[in-house]
Image (cartoon, rainbow, N blue to C red):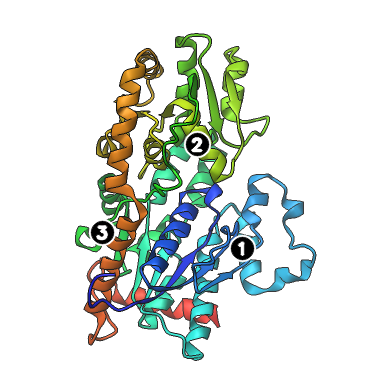
């Protein structure tokens, strides 16, 4: 902590917290750890799937939900009632989540934000007050209630849901699927709230541009603080033995944004002894598995499942190359983690990947959605062990300098201090990115959220 800076009391609100279920869980766990190391008092309110233990936090409060939307995705509507007590469906937020999920909406961010608002309001009545509330990719209506309480609220958006919606349309197979995509994502709510929080963190210039364009957030309210990597955990091991024919990819094949089909289509252009290890759900209907089998390449694709972090580090250290074939990334954490482990990266020049790979310096870029170009870059690096070693060493140094979590936490805390200083001694009302004339709409939303929270 900088000289003269006082410790802050921070409350994180994150509607999903497990680091094996997405980047937001990784971000939450490590940022809370580093802020605690800086001397800040951090409480966490988190929804399922819950994070690993966080002994460095002052408190971690789990806010359950029934995850009805998962039943909707699985088309298991009969199994969507709460268990073991079905009568819990009549609790207002549970009933809302069931009804919204039944009709194909994602209710989780809104419902979680109201539960978090209730918690923080209850604590305020008990005399527990926060200097700042940090929302992690939720942007639910409950955040407006926090703002109405006079709390400074900041948020992190790695990329807006508009990106997921665009790529969902790619996956859709008909009008019914496209209609589901249109209704599923709570984009209107998130954009409305994003324009009203005090600051919005994002991890790349590419994401910042997309947030400005899609959510209407003014550039001066966005702070570009890169995502972090635990460079002690994700690190080279000189004793580890690399397999010179193994490729590694970390990503969900079910998400067309991740470009796994492009990678599978590149395999026939590579020597027959080159194989791919994929860190993803090993479900029999995995899109990558099905594509590989259709091409007669099933034996060359090994799906490891969602592995523990320590095993993931081992996989990074063992692979000759890590391939990131994404068609869009708001940051590209696997690329940064691979470089931290001294493993060179082949990535598509899409989204923020050029920023991450060029900053780290440990990889090469190819055009997106181009299996031949991807295969050519992979083949050339597999034939050049000395160049791979050079890229690996360069990437390690670059990630240590740009993406180590202590630097990320310090930069985040500086923005907190900026927000707290700007609020001190000022009226509760604050300037936002909201359009002129929208104050009445904001007040109406705040009143509605307050009623829902009571």
User: Closer to the N terminus: mark 3 or mark 1?
Assistant: 1
* Relative horizontal placement of residue 300, taking residue 128 as reference (left or right): right
**Residue drawn at 31 percent across, 20 percent down:** 387
The answer to whether one can see residue 364 in this image is no
Give the Cα distance between marks 1 and 2: 28 Å
Q: Position of residue 376 (x, y in %)?
A: 36, 14
Q: Earlier in the sequence, mark 2 or mark 3?
A: 3
Task: Say which quarter of the image contains residue 188.
Answer: bottom left
Residue underneath mark 2: 251
| Label drawn at residue 48 | none
Quarter-of-image position of residue 223:
bottom left
Name which residue lies at 31% across and 42% down.
399
Residue 138, relative to residue 57: is it above or below? above
- The residue identified by callout 1 is 97
Q: In the image, residue 13 lies at what x, y percent?
A: 47, 67
Q: Secondary structure at mark 3?
A: strand
């Amino acid at each position: 902590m900088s000289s003269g800076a006082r410790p802050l009391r921070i409350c994180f609100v994150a509607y999903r917290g497990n680091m094996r279920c997405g980047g937001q869980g990784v971000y939450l766990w490590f940022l809370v750890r580093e802020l605690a190391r800086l001397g800040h008092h951090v409480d966490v309110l988190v929804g399922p799937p819950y994070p690993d233990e966080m002994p460095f936090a002052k408190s971690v409060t789990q806010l359950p939900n029934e995850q009805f939307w998962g039943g909707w995705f699985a088309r298991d509507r009969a199994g969507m009632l709460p268990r073991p007590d079905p009568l819990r469906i009549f609790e207002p937020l549970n009933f809302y989540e069931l009804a919204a999920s039944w009709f194909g909406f994602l209710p989780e961010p809104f419902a979680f934000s109201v539960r978090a608002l209730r918690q923080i309001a209850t604590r305020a009545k008990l005399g527990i007050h926060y200097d700042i509330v940090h929302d992690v990719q939720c942007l639910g209506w409950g955040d407006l209630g926090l703002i109405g309480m006079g709390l400074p609220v900041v948020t992190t958006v790695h990329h807006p849901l508009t990106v997921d919606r665009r790529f969902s349309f790619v996956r859709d197979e008909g009008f019914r699927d496209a209609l589901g995509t249109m209704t599923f994502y709570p984009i209107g709510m998130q954009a409305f709230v994003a324009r009203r929080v005090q600051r919005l963190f994002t991890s790349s210039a590419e994401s910042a541009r997309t947030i400005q364009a899609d959510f209407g957030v003014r550039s001066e309210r966005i702070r570009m603080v890169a995502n972090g990597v635990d460079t002690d955990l994700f690190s080279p091991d000189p004793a580890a033995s690399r397999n010179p024919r193994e490729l590694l990819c970390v990503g969900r094949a079910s998400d067309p944004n991740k470009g796994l089909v492009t990678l599978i289509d590149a395999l026939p252009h590579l020597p027959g002894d080159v194989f791919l290890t994929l860190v993803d759900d090993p479900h029999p209907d995995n899109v990558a598995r099905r594509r590989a089998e259709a091409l007669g390449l099933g034996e060359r694709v090994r799906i490891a499942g969602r592995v523990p972090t320590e095993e993931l580090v081992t996989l990074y250290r063992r692979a000759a190359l890590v391939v990131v074939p994404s068609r869009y990334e708001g940051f590209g954490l696997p690329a940064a983690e691979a470089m931290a482990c001294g493993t060179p990266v082949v990535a598509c020049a899409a989204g923020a990947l050029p920023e991450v790979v060029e900053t780290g310096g440990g990889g090469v870029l190819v055009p997106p959605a181009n299996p031949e170009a991807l295969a050519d870059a992979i083949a050339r690096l597999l034939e050049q062990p000395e160049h791979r070693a050079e890229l690996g060493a360069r990437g390690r140094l670059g990630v240590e300098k740009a993406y180590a979590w202590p630097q990320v936490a310090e930069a985040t805390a500086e923005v907190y201090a900026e927000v707290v200083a700007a609020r001190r001694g000022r009226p509760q009302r604050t300037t936002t990115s909201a359009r002129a004339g929208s104050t009445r709409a904001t007040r109406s939303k705040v009143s509605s959220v307050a009623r829902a929270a009571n």
